[in-house]
Amino acid sequence: MKNYVKKFVRLVFGLFVFAMGVLLTIQANIGLAPWTAFSMGIHYKTQLSLGNVMVISGLLIFVLDIALKEKIGFGTLLDALLIGKFIDLFESTKIIPMATAFWPGLGMLLLGQLIISLGSYFYIGAGLSCGPRDALMVGLGKRLPRVPIGAIRGSIEGTVLVIGWLLGAKVGLGTVISVFGIGFILQFTFKLLRFDVRAVMHESFADTLKLKSRIPLEQ
């Protein structure tokens, strides 16, 4: 039981850190990452907060993941629910100001990507399943085995980026850096922390709920 408490604490802490990194990339003000641009575009056209847009879109993608019969767990659900709310919390405190020049903005963007990578280390390492957007990519990859997974991810992110841009989200050099830079920063962070993401054994809802049947044996 203590092991699962640690898993959930690590998961929620990782999502908290991840959300702080996302807000830094937004406040960098030099261009948004694809999914952030999508959420920001909807935010501009509705009365919803950015965080609530992210929660709603995350839950809709969560439903798609279920329809695709992809393996999902508490990490998938909490990712959809918490990251947006944490972003709203950070925004309400005004703790991260918006950059007004390119070079400070670039520094904020890179720092944000580093913090996103650190948050990913914590929440992925909890082993309670990946976020809904990653699950969607994996699910579509299984349905389209002849299409490279990179092309699937690129198509998804390209589509949401165009939608966000058409709705008024800021697209710029920061967008390019977000798309291509995050992979290098993520790899650097994981290597520095000696974290092998492929070695993580993720649990579905069913796997985690089996804890109930194990507790009497452990006691």
Image (spheres, helix red, strand yellow):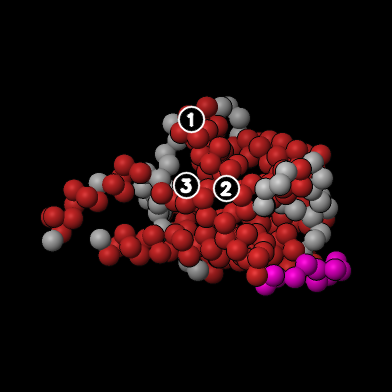
**Residue carrying label 1:** 68
From the image, state whether disc 2 or disc 1 is nearer to you.
Answer: 2
- Pick whichever, 57 or 148, lies toward us: 57
Q: Does the magenta stretch include residue 168?
A: no
**Residue carrying label 3:** 76
First in sequence: mark 3 or mark 2? 2
x, y percentage for residue 37?
73, 48
| Local secondary structure at mark 2 | helix
Give the residue at x 41% y 49%. Answer: 74
Dominant SS in magenta: loop
Q: Looking at the image, can residue 154 be seen?
A: no
Q: Looking at the image, can residue 213 be seen?
A: yes
Q: Residues within 10 Å of mark 3 (few under 14, many from 20)?
A: many
Q: For the residues marked 2 and 1, what is the alpha-carbon distance in whole angstroms?
A: 20 Å
Give the residue at x 67% y 52%. Answer: 50
Amino acid type, label 2: Val
Where does the magenta region start and end?
94-104
Q: Is residue 24 above or below residue 166?
A: below
**Residue carrying label 2:** 55
Q: For the residues marked 1 and 3, what is the alpha-carbon distance in whole angstroms?
A: 14 Å
